[in-house]
Amino acid sequence: MLASCSQPAAEQSATAEVAAKVESAKPMALMMRAIYDQSKSMKQQLDSGNTLDASFYRFMEFHQLEPTDSTVLVEVFYEHNEKFKAAYEELLRASNKPAYNAMLTACVNCHEDFCPGPIKRINKLRYAEQ
Ligand code: HEC
């Protein structure tokens, strides 16, 4: 079952249960956590008026890793990944808030089809539309 996709961590009751899930997390889930942290870090850079360093913010090829639920590995998933990668590259090129939000939209588009649980968290990383 896609526990991390169906409910946010905050709603999970026992700490031991959470710890067990962390230990058993599949490689794709672990990389997703890194991607989430990377997005947060990019936002901090933009907030500080810095240009995103493309050699530091490398694209993470999560689609090659083992997911919690292997049924996600269908054509639409890879199509979402290609669109996400394009939005990611555009963000590194443009280094601005609209491009950052567009990248997050690409995250959410895939999550709507395959892993709705974290969508709220992902949307919290957004800049308010101006
Ligand atoms: C092509 C589809 C796709 C894209 C694009 C995508 N994700 Fe994911 N994401 C997934 C799938 C599938 C999982 C479940 C992975 C697993 O459990 O193995 C996941 C899991 C997660 C999780 C939960 C990890 C955990 O703790 O188990 C977070 C947080 C997350 N993604 C954030 C993001 C962010 C932020 C972006 C964009 C910067 C993003 N995702 C882009 C498909 C995607």
Image (cartoon, rainbow, N blue to C red):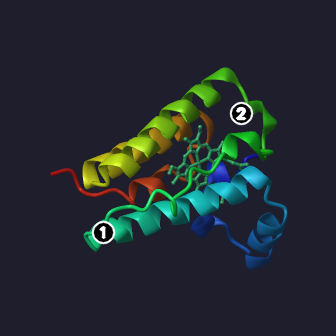
Question: Around disc 2, counting alpha carbons within 10 Å, would you say few (fewer than 14), some (14 to 19), or many (20 or more)?
Answer: some
Q: Does any portion of residue 105 appear in the rendered image? A: no
Compare residues 48 and 10 and report the one nearer the observer. 48
Residue 83 lies left or right of residue 29; in this view the side is: left
Q: Residue at x 66, y 22 (%)?
A: 75
Residue 113 rendering spot, x and y as whole percentages: 57, 32
Q: Amino acid at mark 2?
A: Val
**Which picture quadrant has residue 42?**
bottom left
Q: Residue furthest top?
A: 75
Q: Earlier in the sequence, mark 1 or mark 2?
A: 1
Q: Residue furthest bottom?
A: 15
Residue corresponding to mark 2:
72
Residue corresponding to mark 1:
50
Q: Is mark 2 within 8 Å of ligand 1?
A: yes
Number of marks drawn: 2
Q: Is mark 1 within 8 Å of ligand 1?
A: no
- State how far apart marks 1 and 2 are (Cα): 36 Å
Q: Does any portion of residue 116 appear in the rendered image? A: yes
Secondary structure under badge 2?
A: helix
Q: Residue at x 30, y 68 (%)?
A: 50
Asked if 113 appears above or below 91 in the picture, the reply is above
Asked if 100 appears above or below 76 in the picture, the reply is below
Asked if 101 appears above or below 47 in the picture, the reply is above
Secondary structure under badge 1?
A: loop
For discs 1 and 2, the disc positioned in front in the rendered view: 1
Residue 59 rendering spot, x and y as whole percentages: 57, 50
Residue 39 lies left or right of residue 49; in this view the side is: right
Q: Amino acid at mark 1?
A: Asn
